[in-house]
């Protein structure tokens, strides 16, 4: 009898435990103001990351225990955290309509395949020199570095125009300098960026030409969660270079309108590498931005944005000239209206215009003794987008619209030759070299993309896009026309891109398979540059107005599994690249400037038949406790020029990022290690050399002693490692420094911010 009683108690205990673990919680999500059910809200159990979505009636069911904390989020509402009850009704408060983001991961009918959102405020504590440096520890990325100012992301094997880099969901600032001293990453300050959205290949057609991926730099939008007057003041200092950063912002939010003003000043000096050698890398920038938003109704948002950037006294260690100034402005108008009808979910319009005014000179270089060279260049970019989101049924979303991106560039190089063949000229000779030949490249696109939800766990996405391209130049150089047989006619193209993907997610597991065909027209540099050194090697480069567009057919599969304390993710990809655009040596084109200086022939852009890229990214994260987390990521890309039987140039080597972070209520600290392997796969045709591997260790910490005030500090490159990245340019502004540009040695930083 006693044994039966014990057995009965044991069975009841097991049943109670099982019931507690598998309790099916029911609930409903509604709008706080009018009690309308909210569809596609994400309800996530925080202890194990298991999540579900609300249906069209706002209802959901979830396996959880009473008392568990759950997070409820939706793109149009403020995120809240609450405790599980047996049956609950959750009210969400509407937030402002967002005009800057492109990825909506909370809604399977709006999400983009093979996309990721990066939001890591820790890197801003260490004051990276430009937005480009924010990519340094993101899996799959490398950085092309020409000095302390001009740094650009390289993703897998893709760079420059092969990546569609945009700002706030579609606006662009295009470099005026042929050497890319002034990419978009230099015209936006890191402290202004809230997050970085990344689409990892040609898997969407909604945001312009997409050959190798999309990078959307999303600026802060503090108007979402607060009303009234707010602001901040901030500042920081770095020991290596005696670098100073200051900034301030002011914000006023009312129910119907808001105004946000932001400003920053940065003064960076020459840094020292791990061996104590000073690297010419100083610059100064002044930036400000203004956003004015109007909410005519709860379903509408109108926004006007304006920003200007002023760069001064910029040293470029890896380029033949420096920049006395680099100025730009960007202005845009956005409008969005939601719920026009049962079938039309939203209508969005975006229009923008940007201008870059840039000067290159050799005034502080040794070559100035013989030749005074100055190159004022300008670029104008304007365009926009109109998009409809249509819902033919509850399980289908269609995005269709048109977009445009127009680019014009002008600029000449004036050379005043003072010494010729070793003889000082009594009257210097003046030469004018046409850089851009008054060129333009215009792209007007039309697209349609649909998401179809097969069931609660599976979504299929398909899309198609047509780009109508026109390219011309109004002031061609005589020798450029002669090279191509006389008058060069304007060129037109019609390029078709497409994508298809399937996504399955259930109980913390997600898998995606995507295939995309991305087509990219040749850039202005690839078409029209005329005997300028714009590569990492010393050759003069010559454009080709008759280039065919290059095509990337990419396959990618990804897996993600979230357990209670462990998260594992992996992506595997392969690209078939046809008509790939690359510069090759043409022995029939002699060097034009300093004709006896090796190499005495030029490179010309051509299409090659076939190239490939293959690789993977893998992540493993472990949550040891609510406060302690371990992270790890590895990435590798292998790319091959099949025509030349050699690797493609400028490919990041195998990389691993390891981290540990402890976060309490008012303070946190983190250690991050970056391990980079030797790059032995090099392109001989680009004079590449093998790059040794290295490892670095950084320490970052922060504290918030009272509400609104935070202090961060860091020690970067703790062991004062002397190293350089494979993608760094070589020194080009010194008679004593040679080889690749080395990275900064040990660097102590601090940063303070007060918000009110």
Image (cartoon, rainbow, N blue to C red):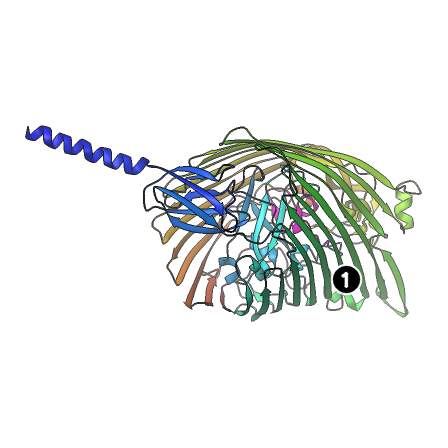
68 up-or-down from 263: above or below: above
Closer to the camera in the image, 571 or 382: 382
Residue 150 % position (x, y): 66, 58
Q: Could you tell me which quadrant the N terminus lies in?
A: top left
Say which residue appears at 62% left-offset and 47% top-offset: 215
Q: Judge left or right: residue 171 versus residue 673.
A: right
In the current view of this chain or complex, which residue is farthest to the front? 34
Q: Mark 1 = which residue?
A: 357
> Eyeballing the image, is 69 above or below 413?
above
Of residues 613 and 171, the one drawn nearer to the viewer in this rendering: 171
Query: 59 and 310: which one is in front?
Result: 59
- Residue 537 belongs to magenta span: no
Element carrying mark 1: strand
Q: Residue at x 59, y 68 (%)?
A: 250
From the top left corner, tell me how far across and down residue 598 is, in percent: 76, 51
Coordinates of residue 547 in the picture (x, y in percent): 80, 38
- Tell me: 165 left or right of 243: right
Residue 10 appears anywhere in the view = yes
Front residue (pair 478, 421): 478
Q: Is residue 150 visible?
A: no
Q: Which residues are magenta?
A: 153-174
Residue at 54% across / 66% down in the picture? 276
Report x, y in % for residue 36. 52, 44
The vertical placement of 96 against 648, above or below, is: below
- Say which quarter of the image contains residue 6: top left
Position of 546 with respect to 208 (left or right) is: right
Decide: few, some or many residues near mark 1? Use Cα within 10 Å; few <14, some 14-19, many ≥20.
many
- Count of picture labels: 1
| Residue that lies at the very extreme toward the right in this rendered image | 486
Image position of 36 with respect to 700: above or below: above
């Amino acid at each position: 009898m006693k044994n039966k009683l014990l057995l009965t108690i044991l069975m009841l205990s097991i049943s109670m435990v099982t019931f507690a673990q598998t309790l099916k919680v029911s609930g409903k999500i509604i709008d706080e103001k009018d009690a309308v059910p909210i569809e596609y809200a994400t309800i996530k159990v925080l202890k194990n990351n298991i999540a579900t979505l609300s249906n069209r009636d706002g209802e959901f069911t979830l396996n959880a225990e009473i008392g568990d904390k759950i997070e409820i989020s939706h793109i149009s509402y403020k995120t809240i955290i609450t405790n599980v009850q047996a049956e609950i009704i959750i009210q969400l408060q509407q937030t402002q309509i967002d005009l800057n983001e492109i990825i909506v991961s909370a809604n399977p009918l709006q999400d983009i395949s093979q996309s990721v959102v990066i939001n890591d405020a820790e890197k801003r504590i260490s004051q990276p020199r430009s937005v480009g440096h924010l990519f340094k520890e993101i899996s799959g990325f490398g950085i092309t570095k020409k000095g302390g100012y001009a740094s650009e992301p390289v993703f897998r094997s893709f760079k420059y125009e092969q990546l569609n880099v945009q700002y706030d969901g579609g606006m662009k600032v295009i470099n005026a300098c042929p050497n890319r001293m002034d990419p978009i990453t230099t015209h936006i300050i890191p402290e202004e960026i809230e997050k970085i959205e990344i689409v990892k290949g040609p898997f969407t057609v909604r945001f312009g030409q997409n050959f190798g991926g999309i990078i959307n730099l999303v600026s802060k939008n503090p108007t979402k969660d607060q009303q009234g007057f707010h602001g901040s003041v901030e500042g920081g200092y770095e020991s290596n270079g005696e670098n100073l950063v200051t900034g301030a912002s002011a914000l006023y939010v009312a129910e119907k309108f808001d105004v946000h003003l932001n400003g920053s000043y940065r003064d960076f000096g020459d840094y020292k590498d791990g061996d104590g050698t000073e690297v010419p890398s100083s610059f100064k920038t002044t930036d400000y931005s203004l956003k004015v938003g109007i909410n005519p109704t709860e379903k509408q948002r109108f926004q006007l944005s304006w920003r200007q950037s002023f760069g001064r006294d910029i040293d470029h260690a890896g380029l033949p000239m420096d920049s006395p100034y680099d100025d730009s402005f960007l202005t845009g108008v956005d409008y969005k209206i939601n719920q026009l009808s049962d079938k039309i979910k939203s209508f969005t319009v975006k229009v923008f215009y940007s201008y870059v005014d840039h000067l290159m000179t050799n005034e502080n270089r040794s070559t100035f003794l013989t030749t005074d060279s100055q190159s004022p260049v300008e670029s104008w970019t304007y365009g926009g987008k109109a998009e409809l989101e249509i819902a033919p049924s509850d399980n289908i979303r269609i995005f269709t619209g048109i977009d445009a991106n127009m680019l014009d560039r002008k600029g000449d190089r004036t050379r005043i030759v003072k010494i010729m063949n070793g003889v000082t000229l009594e009257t210097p000779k003046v030469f004018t070299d046409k850089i851009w030949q008054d060129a333009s490249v215009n792209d007007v696109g039309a697209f349609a993309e649909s998401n179809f939800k097969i069931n609660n766990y599976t979504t299929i996405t398909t899309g198609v896009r047509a780009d109508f391209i026109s390219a011309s130049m109004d002031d061609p150089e005589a020798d450029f026309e002669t090279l191509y047989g006389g008058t060069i006619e304007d060129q037109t193209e019609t390029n078709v891109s497409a994508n298809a993907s399937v996504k399955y997610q259930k109980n913390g597991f997600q898998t995606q398979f995507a295939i995309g065909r991305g087509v990219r027209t040749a850039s202005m540099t690839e078409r029209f540059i005329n005997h300028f050194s714009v590569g990492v090697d010393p050759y003069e480069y010559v454009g080709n107005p008759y280039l065919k567009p290059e095509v990337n057919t990419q396959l990618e599969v990804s897996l993600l599994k979230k357990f209670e304390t462990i998260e594992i993710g992996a992506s595997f990809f392969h690209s078939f690249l046809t008509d790939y655009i690359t510069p090759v040596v043409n022995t029939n084109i002699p060097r034009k400037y300093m004709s006896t200086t090796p190499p005495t022939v030029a490179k010309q852009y051509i299409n090659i038949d076939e190239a490939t890229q293959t690789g993977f990214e893998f992540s493993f994260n472990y949550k040891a406790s609510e406060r302690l987390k371990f992270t790890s990521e590895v990435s590798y890309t292998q790319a091959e020029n099949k025509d030349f039987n050699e690797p493609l140039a400028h490919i990041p080597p195998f990389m691993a990022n390891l981290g540990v972070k402890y976060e309490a209520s008012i303070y946190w600290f983190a250690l991050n290690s970056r391990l980079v392997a030797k790059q032995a796969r090099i392109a001989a045709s680009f004079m590449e050399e093998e790059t040794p591997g290295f490892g670095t260790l950084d320490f970052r910490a922060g504290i918030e002693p009272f509400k609104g005030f935070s202090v961060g500090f860091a020690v970067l490159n703790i062991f004062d490692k002397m190293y350089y990245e494979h993608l760094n340019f070589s020194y080009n502004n010194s008679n004593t420094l040679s080889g690749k540009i080395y990275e900064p040695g040990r660097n102590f930083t601090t940063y303070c911010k007060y918000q009110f």
